[in-house]
Amino acid sequence: MKITDAKVIVTCPGRNFVTLKIYTNKGIYGLGDATLNGMEKPVVAFLENYCIPALIGKDPQNTEDIWHFFYRGIYWKRGSVAMTAISAIDMALWDIKGKVLNTPLYNLIGGKSRDKIMVYAHANGVNLDDTILKAGIEKEKGFRAIRIQSGVPGIADTYGVAKDSKFYEPAHKGLPHTEYWDTAKYLNYIPRLFEKVRETFGSDIHLLHDVHHRCTPIEAARLAKELEPFHLFWLEDPVSGELQEGLRLIRKHSTTPIAIGEVFNSVYDYSTLITEQLIDYIRMPLSHGGGITHLKKITDFASVYHINTGFHGATDLSPVNLAASIHFNMAINNFGILEFMPHQDLVHEVFKINYKFEEGFLKIDDTPGIGVDIDEEKASKYPYTMASLPVNRKSDGTMFYW
Ligand code: CS2
Ligand code: MG
């Protein structure tokens, strides 16, 4: 079997998505998600100018060798752009493998360990009362786990919390805009917020919170410690994690579980965190972290250290990634939870999906491969629109480290 061609489809049904489509001489094609929010075009360029020409003629069934060809074979290793491209290639090849063997992806990586995947919703409110209201709406929809984010008193723009509170989209049209941050105000407010949320919803619901890398290790340790009474399911990205040793400080002070790594892209970002058991959940998604081939190795490694998955699943990851993530988490033993932010309806005009939400869980059908398809005619109706994630400054104007 041979790869005969591949192309990159860029579409913007409400937001940008990049999809890699790999063709074979057997009339079977595979799809991979190559979307990197705000950096779509660099991934397209890398795929078109380097990866696709190198793929032609290779046997698509050799997923292990092709993965190493692009990861280890390339002298200039890693980086989010290259790893997103490699992830898309790997995902598309596993899609092809499933279609060739006429079986859903989960069967290729261990079969079913469970029938459904527990997911968490987002509740983003402009202030405390609005956040409680939004959390109540998600609870009503049947979610058993809710991520609580809120505008912080005294901070004009809080990352990911829309002022008009319509839907979650941290990227804004055009070049990066600037947001301003004040850690002291944030740290004073968040424990009060969770106290109120627990008081309102009781102890049964799982609560999560994302710090978006905005604390230093000692600040994160304080936050994790002060949130302890409210029994979070996890505290996400309390620090950037680039300094892996920084997580030791948080662990020393608190039993709040920690999730990290939506911006990571290699097992080497995780090695200290895993072997020293400094975290509890792996956030790195299939579409940025090297695809199924790499994440299978990392999650098996993590499993030895009692660390579970909690993959990134914001709306800037496409339905192809979401479906692949459901298959993956159905199969592995150390599944924890999956992030689920439903895409806007327009997205489902372009992508035909094979999963559905039911009472707090996602279920997927047994279509061979990943099971999601793209309608290219519909995709062409929505041209790419430049959008960027914000940069962050302290209130005195200093660029903020995150
Ligand atoms: C967030 C993301 O879902 C999350 O946990 O951190 O929404 C993230 O900010 C975006 O995916 C960035 O593109
Ligand atoms: Mg996050």
Image (spheres, rainbow, N blue to C red):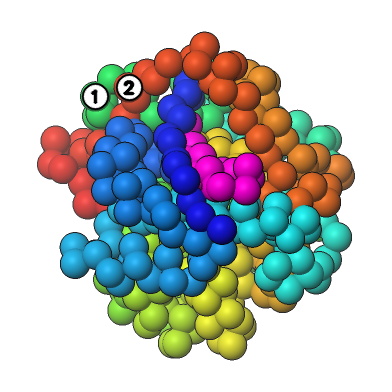
- Give the side of residue 369 with respect to residue 365, left or right: left
- Give the side of residue 232 with respect to residue 117, left or right: left
- Real-space Cα separation, disc 2 to disc 1, in angstroms: 8 Å
Residue type at the position of mark 1? Leu
Residue 31 position in % (x across, y down)? 56, 43
Disc 2, SS: loop
Q: Residue, x 55% and y 38% (percent of image)?
A: 318
Q: Nearer the viewer, mark 2 or mark 1?
A: 2
Residue carrying label 1: 175
Disc 1, SS: loop
Specify the quadrant of the image occupied by residue 376: top right
- Residues 253 and 122: in front is 122
Q: Residue, x 38% and y 61% (percent of image)?
A: 265
Can residue 161 be seen by looking at this rendering?
Answer: no
Q: Is residue 26 magenta?
A: yes
Segment tinted magenta in the rendering: 16-32
Q: Residue, x 73% and y 73% (percent of image)?
A: 110
Q: Residue, x 21% and y 46% (percent of image)?
A: 400
Q: Residues within 10 Å of mark 2 (few under 14, many from 20)?
A: some
